[in-house]
Amino acid sequence: MTDTPDRVVIAGASAAGLSAAETLRRSGHSGTIMLIGSEPVPAYDRPPLSKEILSGAWTPDRISLRTQADLDALDLDARYGVAAIGLDLATRTVALSDGTEVAFDGLIVATGVRPRKLPGAPARVLRSLDDALALKDSIGPGSRLVVVGAGFLGCEVAAVAVGLGTEVIVVEPAAVPLAHAVGEDVGSMLAQAHQDRGVDLRTDTGVAEVVPAGVRLQDGSVIEADAVLVAIGSLPNTEWLVGSGLTVDNGVVCDEFCAAAPGVYGAGDVARWDNPLFGTSMRIEHRTNAAEQGMAAARNLLGAHRPFAPVPYFWSDQYDMKIRAYGDLRGHDEMRVVEGSLRERRFTALYRSGDHLAGVLSVGMSPKSMRAWHRAVAARAAWLEAVPDTPSSTLGATA
Amino acid sequence: MRVEVDVPKCVGSGQCALLAPDVFDQREEDGMVVLLDESPPVELHDAVREAAVVCPAAVIRLVEQ
């Protein structure tokens, strides 16, 4: 390559940014790498925040993603506690919150997301280690927690909190939690699991605002609580890109190579890109995607010109249930249990979109057995081949 | 290259076994990582490094020699 960037700036120092930095060095990039992180500490792992950190099973030192020696070996110009606040593509500079400007030849946008909030009084959110430790301090026996939003984060927190003896009320506007993500049958199974453990799950219930005493519902009534966790999704941190010339539309918009502009690539939760495997634009807030996309963005910045076509993967721990899923389950047309049963809370379910196997989700099954399904999703297997005994009468019309 | 794995941190995602199946496997019952080769041959080093980068729980540590 003749136009290898000498100065690379990575805006965002969490999983995606770290992966990009490591990939640049591993690929032989010998120029400078400036890693800009808005949090005051090097990258740490976020999935344990709502699991092992909240429960107290792990102390915070266990979630560092790399040792100091590993970070030192990368020879980074790391700026922690500093945010990127502006981008000028004409001069190829990034403005930082400490008042300085830094020039780049190549830029990776990995500024992540932040929790959506509700109007009214302050409430807890869960994104950072500090958030998790503060939440941990406000749960336990004798304490009442209202969780707003029964998504994966809210459900994980509810499971840990009720396990620690907290009185937990989960408020969710949809009729079935997680139905948009995993379908109504699996969502109903998860809802029942929470109710069996004593969680007071209130579906079809919208929250108007947080009040000092708890939350005010849309019908005007108040649920009192010692603590309120708002877990209603995230917003991509793209404000610093407004007016830069990059396209921002629920994330920084990238092509199949994760490129947002020449020499500018997006990675992780903040990036919306065209996934050629599924032929659709995606923005994925999964831990594994952050690392994989950081790697892909870095390679393509160095000229690899390789489309980023991953099979998304996520997992969630709730009580003794290990939930794992590969693929793109959102907007599926059909779900079919092919192993175990929902009643046992131990099963493998396949998801169809159009004529294809779109994804697979399992609860309590051997993770190793999922690998064959991963390969089938990656190969864009036809539904009828993946599920050979499917009666055609149940398929219905397909797009 | 020497490979080390911190098994208690493993979340059983299986990304390593997908990338470098000659070096990493998973326990049948819970999917925890099983290290098959702690000194993999040089032709597998790139795949092993990739596995270390994408491991979602930072379980894999490489000591380059």
Image (spheres, coloured by chain):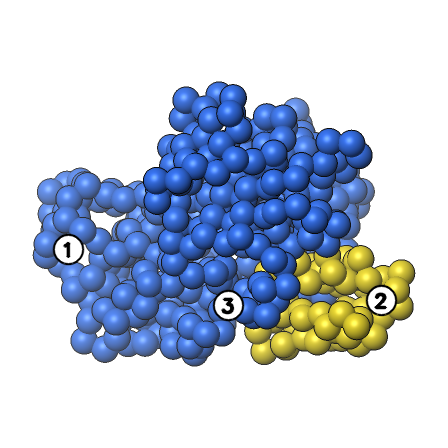
Chain colours: A blue, B yellow
Q: Secondary structure at mark 3?
A: loop
Q: Residues within 10 Å of mark 1 (few under 14, many from 20)?
A: many
From where the camera sits, is residue A359 visible? no
User: Within 10 angstroms of label 2, few (less than 14), some, or many (20 or more) residues?
Assistant: some
Residue designated by label 1: A214
Distance, label 3 to label 2, CA atoms, is: 27 Å
What is the three-letter code of the residue carrying label 1?
Gly
Task: Give the Cα distance between marks 1 and 2.
Answer: 54 Å
Please indicate whether residue A207 sits to the left or right of residue A323 in the image: left
Identify the secondary structure beneath mark 2: loop
Residue A377 vs residue B43: left or right?
A: left
Q: CA distance from mark 1 to mark 3?
A: 34 Å
Give the residue drawn at x 19%, y 41%: A119
Question: Which chain is home to disc 1?
Answer: A
- What is the chain identity of the residue bearing mark 2? B
Residue type indicated by callout 3: Ser
Same chain for marks 1 and 3?
A: yes
Place of residue B55 in the rendered image (x, y in percent of width and height, measured from the top left): 64, 61
> Do circles 1 and 2 both sit on a common chain?
no
Residue A316, image x, y percentages: 51, 60
- Residue at mark 3: A64
Q: Residue at x 37, y 70 (%)?
A: A54
Judge depth for marks 1 and 3 and give the one in front.
3
Which element type, helix, strand or loop, lies under badge 1? strand
Q: Which residue was labeled with disc 2? A: B22
Residue type indicated by callout 2: Asp
Q: Is residue A71 visible?
A: yes
Q: Is residue A10 left or right of residue A28?
A: left
